[in-house]
Image: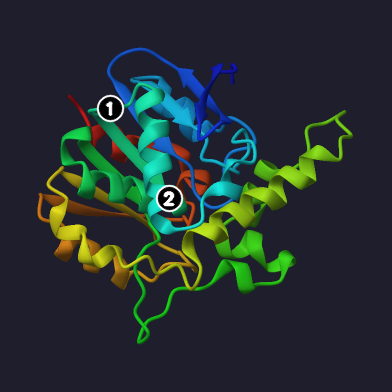
Amino acid sequence: MSEPDTTTVEVNGFSCRVWRKGSGPVLGFLAGYGGLPRWTPFLDAVARERTVIVPSLPGFPGGDRGHTVLDTHLDWVLATRQLLDKAGLAGADLAGSSVGGSLAAEIAAIWPQSVRTLALIAPFGLFDEKDPATDPWAQRAPDIPGLLCADPERWTALKAEPEGQNSPEWPIEQVRANEAAARIFWPLGNSKLEKRLKLITAPTLLVWGEHDRIMPRSYADRFAAGIAGPSEISIIAGAGHLAELDQPGEVAGAILAWTKP
């Protein structure tokens, strides 16, 4: 894989990394739990047909320490709106996974004109006490890879320190990303997004890993039922919560087909 072009934008006085690669109509992507410390095969697959732009959320890898000034869920939504606008994603197709999927849905609900089409990979934001989601922040560290991916090695490889690098910053950055996500979704990942789903008019694809151990399959149906615009559910075989890591080609293909201009 060749490396993407890297720039930065400022949100609330903090620097946020923006990756860009490919050609054609723009498609934005907001990463899931843990963020993206490195470029992935999924992003490469999208970049073969589209210009993919990947802004890093505050506190995520590449997102500096801007999460420390975001005290409420509204703070996070407003920061995400600023980030997308400054990254050149206003009015573009938007995809998001997990944590990033929930924020993408919020943007589409509150500013419908800012999103042309939407693709959400097992987004956070809902909670059903009869069918509760798994709280990743309450789990033992060794169990996290198997909860996030059907193939735990996919998560381990994403988070592994680059060969030859021996910097204390790498593990600190990974811990910071988990802390940032926890600040958005404490407690239990429930941001009351269900109340705002009816405001989403953008055509929305809901992508769910067949073996998702974080977000129950029933949540896909709840999202689809609540969204006002046309929606469709795509179940990805052999994939867990972060389906784009387990099955990058299949997830990229589904999103590219849905968001085709």
**Is 108 displayed left or right of 78 in the figure?**
left
Look at the numbered disc 1 and give the secondary structure of its residue: loop
Residue at 49 percent across and 69 percent down: it is: 213
Look at the numbered disc 2 and give the secondary structure of its residue: helix
Give the spatial CA distance, label 1 vs label 2.
Answer: 19 Å
**Is 242 displayed left or right of 170 in the figure?**
left
The x and y percentages for residue 99 are: 46, 53
The residue tagged 2 is 75
Q: In this picture, is 95 found above or below 135?
A: above
Q: In this picture, is 257 found above or below 99?
A: above
The residue tagged 1 is 90
Amino acid on which disc 1 is placed: Ala
The x and y percentages for residue 122 are: 38, 57
The x and y percentages for residue 78 are: 37, 43
In this view, the residue in front, 211 or 34, is 34
Residue 175: image tag: none
Q: Is residue 56 visible?
A: yes
Amino acid on which disc 2 is placed: Asp
Residue at 40 percent across and 69 percent down: it is: 190
- Of circles 1 and 2, the one toward us is 2
Image quarter of the N terminus: top right
Image quarter of the C terminus: top left
**Is 26 displayed left or right of 4 in the figure?**
left
